[in-house]
Amino acid sequence: MNIRKLILQGEGTTLDFKKTINNYEKIAKSLVAFANNKGGQLLIGVADDGSIKGVKSEEEERYMITKSAHQFCKPAIEPEFEEIYIDNKLVLVAKIAQSDTKPHYALDENKKWWVYFRVNDKSILASKIIVDVLKKENTHSGQLIKYTEQERMLLKFLDEEGRITLKQFSKLTKISNQKAQKILVSFILADLIQPNSSEKEEYFTMTTPK
């Protein structure tokens, strides 16, 4: 693994830097967000700006991550570890695979369980739409989407405006929020649109071709 190259990419959907581990709940949030999305890697001993600080006690960090993965995540998560030395500093890499038992929940400070999802470089609280997608992902087998009038309107709007919220889609097509949500879920599962999150709201955009 070329760790320097990885660090230069910066934090993103599949990469998170942690200078140190000092909170089970915070780390559980990152772990489930990775497992609920495409998987990812935590680099322990690396600051947010990408500078390498190294870990003081690899055993302690490894213990905290494992305990968090087993007791603060449900279903439990199994991280894989790798130790890498850079300039005589130890970076602990915790690899989290994409899960096939989604959704995973993380326990917070108030003893409540929440679903988190990775969007860009943030672990965000999953909306009802994302939770629904995660539940259906496990049983999803590429069905053919037959476009209804509402679905055609959704694609046309996205093509012209670039983004849409659940509320906008419901208003545009004059259908209930529940029905609008079902259509959005089926489009996310078919990889036609993707969820995005800003501080104000969740919105949906066309999936960018890989």
Image: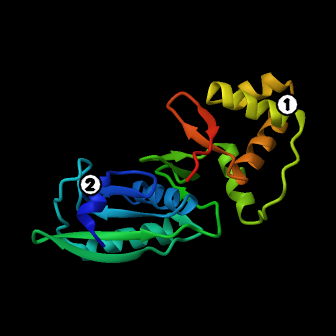
- To which quarter of the image does residue 7 belong? bottom left
**Looking at the rendered structure, which numbered label has been put on residue 8?**
2
- Identify the element where label 2 is drawn: helix
Mark 1 is on which residue type?
Answer: Ser
Q: Residue at x 27, y 69 (%)?
A: 2
Front position in the image: 78 or 86: 86
Q: Residue at x 61, y 45 (%)?
A: 207
Residue 79 horizontal/vertical position (percent): 44, 73
Q: Residue at x 32, y 77 (%)?
A: 82
- To which quarter of the image does residue 149 belong? top right
Label 2 CA crowd tier, 10 Å (few <14, some 14–19, many 20+)? few
Front position in the image: 38 or 103: 38
Q: Is residue 76 left or right of residue 140?
A: left
Residue 165 in view here: no
Q: Which residue is mark 1?
A: 176
Most extreme residue toward the left is 88
- Considering only vertical position in the picture, is 180 above or below 194? above
| Mark positioned earlier in the residue sequence (1 or 2) | 2
Residue 202 horizontal/vertical position (percent): 60, 34
- Identify the element where label 1 is drawn: loop
